[in-house]
Image (cartoon, rainbow, N blue to C red):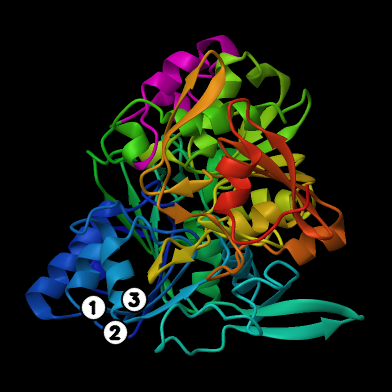
Amino acid sequence: MFRIVSAEYAVSHIKDGDCIGINAFLSLANPGALHDAISNRVEATGHPSNLTLFGSSGFGAWDESMFADRYAALGAVSKVIASHFASMPVITRLAVENKIEVYNLPLGVLSHCLRAAAGGEKGLLSRVGRNIFVDPRIDGPGVNSISREELVTVTQVAGEEYLYYKTPAIDVALIKGTTVDPNGNITFEKECLTVDALALAQATKANGGIVIVQVEGVSHVFARPRNVIVPGILVDYVVVVEDQKQLLHTDYNPTLSGDIHVPPSHMDYWLSRMKLSGKRGEKETDPAHLLIGERASKELKPGQVVNLGIGIPEVVAQCASRAGKLNEMTLTVESGGVGGLPAPGIAFGATIGADFISDTSQQFDMYNGGGLDICFMGGLEIDRYGNVNAHKLKGKFVGIGGFANITYATKTVVFCVTFNTKGLKVHTEDGKLVIDSEGSISKFKREIEAISFSAKNALETGQNVLYVTERCVFKLTEKGLKLIEITPGAELQRDILSRLDFVPEL
C-alpha cells in the first residue's frame, strides 16, 4: 500500500550499494526533489554511498549543482549506466578522471533492457550495436580503464549474430509524475514524457525493490484507467512537490503536454519561444549550419516519417517549418513523440503539438523495425569508408544516446556536419558560398577514434546514406565516400580535395 511521505523519509530507504533507476530523459521528467533529498542526506550523514545509477537516457541538467550530479560530486556514486552524458558534467568528469565506472550503451537498448527486466529476464538479445563501439570485439561499453564489467557479449541464434545485453537489477526507482489518486495511481498530465516509468516500476518490483514517485498534486477523484501511467500496486512512496516545474526554467508549457494542439501555421511562433541547444541558442544561426539545414531539408518528401537529432539537425526542423513542409510529413523524437515539432535545446525530447506520445521503449520498437523513412543526425568525425563517430573525441565523450538505434534501420540516413571545425566561418553572396576562414580541425579523416555508425552494416542492409556539409555532399558506396554535389561557390580542388587526407570517389 502506497504512502504519501516527505522526500527525506522516502530516500531514507535507499541503502549503500543500491542500484537506482532514474526515469528521465535528460532534464525532462526528472524528479528533482528526490535528487535533492538524496544529496542533503549524503551531506548530513555520508549515506547512501557506493550507488549505481541506471538511466536509459541521461539524467542531468547541464548544471553541477542539480539532480544526480550533486551527490555524485559528494562521492556517493560508484557506477553509472546510461546512453547520454552531455547533461551530466560531474559524472562525465569523474569518468574521464577514472574515479567511477561508467558504461555507455544505446538508448533504445537500455530502454528495452528495462522492459526485459520487468519480465524477469536476465538479458536482452538485439542486433543493434553490432560492429560499433559497444560491440566487445570493437571497444565495449566501458568508457574508462576501470569499467570492466561484462555487460555485452556476442552470440549466435538460429544462424544470426546478436549482442546479448545484461539487464539491470534495480533496487530503487525514482519517477516524476503529475498526480496521485486515492489508490496511488500516477498520472502524467503535465509531463512532456512518460519515458519508461511503467517498465522501470515493474523492473524494480521484479527485483524486490521500492518505487518512489514525485508528483505535483493529490486528487480525491479516481483517475481514468487509460490515463494511469504507473498503477498504485507498484508504488511504495509518493512525495508531493506542489511547485515542481515541467522544464528546468518553465513551470508549464501546455503545447508540450498536449493540452494545446499546435497547427503547422502556428509552429514558428511556438518554436521561437524556445532556444536551440548550446551556443546555437545564444546567437543567430551559424551560416554554415543554415546552409547544411537548407540542403538537408531538400531530402524531405511528403508522407515521410522523420527523426531529427540534436545539434545542426535542429536547423533542418527550422528550415522545414519556414518552407511550409511540416504538414506534409510526420516528425518523431526518440523519447516518444509522434507528430508536431521536436522541441530544441534544454527541452529536447519534448514535442510541440504532438499527435501521440508513447513510452520510449515503444518508440524504439518502431525505429528498430524500420518505421522511419529518414533521419538527420550530427557527427564528430567521419572516415573514408563512411563510418561515423558521434559520441567521443580526444578524451571527451557525450554518449551515444539514441543515435545507434535511430540509424540502425532507417531507410535514408542524412548526416549533417560542417566540413571542418574550430575557426570555420562562411557567408553567402548572390546565392554562392564564400569561405572566410577554414576550421583547423577536419571532420573527414582516414581513421576515426570510435565508431557510432557502421558503414558495413548500412551497406549490408541497403540504407541510403548521405553526408551533407556546407560545401559539398557525399554519398555512401561500396568503395566508401563518393562526392556527389558541390555547393555553388566552392571549388573542388581548393576547398574539398586538398583538405582531405584520402581521395573520395568522384
- Which picture quadrant has residue 462? bottom right
Q: Residues within 10 Å of mark 1 (few under 14, many from 20)?
A: many
Q: Which residues are magenta?
A: 252-278
Q: Residue at x 32, y 81 (%)?
A: 100
User: How far apart are the two marked residues, 1 and 3, measured between alpha carbons?
Assistant: 14 Å
The tally of labels here is: 3
In the rendered view, does 285 fall on the left or right side of 149?
left
> The disc labelled 2 sits on which kind of residue?
Asn
- Residue identifier under label 1: 76
Sequence-wise, the earlier of marks 2 and 1 is 2
> The disc labelled 3 sits on which kind of residue?
Ala
- In the displayed structure, 165 sits above or below 451; it is below
SS class, disc 1: loop
> The disc labelled 1 sits on which kind of residue?
Ala
Q: Is residue 275 magenta?
A: yes
- Residue identifier under label 3: 95
Q: Residues within 10 Å of mark 3 (few under 14, many from 20)?
A: many
SS class, disc 2: loop
Asked whether the viewer can see residue 449, the reply is yes
| Residue 191 percent location from the top left of the image | 43, 39
